[in-house]
Image (spheres, helix red, strand yellow):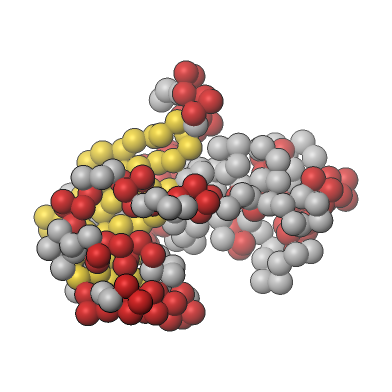
Amino acid sequence: MPLIGGKLAVRLLDRVSRHGTVGYPDVATAYLGKSKIEILLGSSIWDEFRNRDVIDFGCGDGAEAVEIAMRGARRVIGIDIRRKALEGACARARQARVSEKCVFVAEWHEPVDYIVSLDAFEHFADPAAILKTMHRLLKPEGAILTSFGPIWRHPLGGHIYSVFPYAHLLISENALVRWRSQYKTDGATSIEGSGLNRMTIRRFERYVAASPLRIERLEAVPIRRLRRIANRFTREFTTATVRCRLVPR
């Protein structure tokens, strides 16, 4: 149960966040000058993608999709529901001269060899439906490669709500949403409504178990400072990133 609520909690969040200017840190800075895909999925991933059809599910501005195309994939399909993101991804592909190998769309129907999903499963409003869609878009011998985090019980698992470690667990949802509404205009009235589904490792495993997919490999990458105490009993609190390979049953 949250320990702090009401106006006191809102004032605390506002003060610690410097009136909304400091929230969840931009994790993208961790990949500056580096390959995000290679860091999260390993350098051997390029051999798997070579001459294959790959979907980047939730492609955003297309950075990873374009890299996959440049590193030897036969065709890359970037899927995103945001039109501006798709427009930016197309421009990025043109600039990198891989437009002929890239397609950026809101929907796709043809099965592919691989599906990549990075930093998305903690945001999907309906993870069960997403898993079914991914299965439908995957060839029988294909694989889904996903990495997501921080998970809900990570010190910063509240993303924008984690203005200090574990703020999202210590402060009431009502106060968190009230504080956020001072700086965001999307009208969200809940944590889920602001784009977080409170994903944990256990919840993810349950979603997969109820899907047409199975976990071939799952790695809970520990927070560096908590590595010594990271194990299957503490993983929800000590995991920085989840890496997983899913295949059809």
The answer to whether any part of residue 29 appears in the image is: yes
The answer to whether any part of residue 56 appears in the image is: no
Query: Which residue appears at 49% of the width and 28% of the height?
Result: 224
Q: Nearer the viewer, residue 162 or 201?
A: 162
Residue 166, given in percent of the width and then of the height, sits at 66, 38
Q: Quadrant of residue 108?
A: bottom left
Residue 11, given in percent of the width and then of the height, sits at 86, 49
Q: Quadrant of the N terminus?
A: top right
Query: Which residue appears at 26% of the width and 54% of the height?
Result: 144
Query: Which residue appears at 72% of the width and 52% of the height?
Result: 22
Q: Is residue 73 left or right of residue 244?
A: left
Q: Is residue 216 left or right of residue 122?
A: left
Residue 4, given in percent of the width and then of the height, sits at 80, 40
Q: Nearer the viewer, residue 245 or 89?
A: 89
Q: Quadrant of residue 181?
A: bottom right
Q: In the rendered image of this protein, does residue 18 appear above or below residue 220?
A: below
Q: Nearer the viewer, residue 66 or 12?
A: 66
Query: Which residue appears at 44% of the width and 56% of the height?
Result: 120
Judged from this view, the residue extending furthest toward the top is: 228
Q: Count the labels in the image.
A: 0
Residue 82, given in percent of the width and then of the height, sits at 47, 76
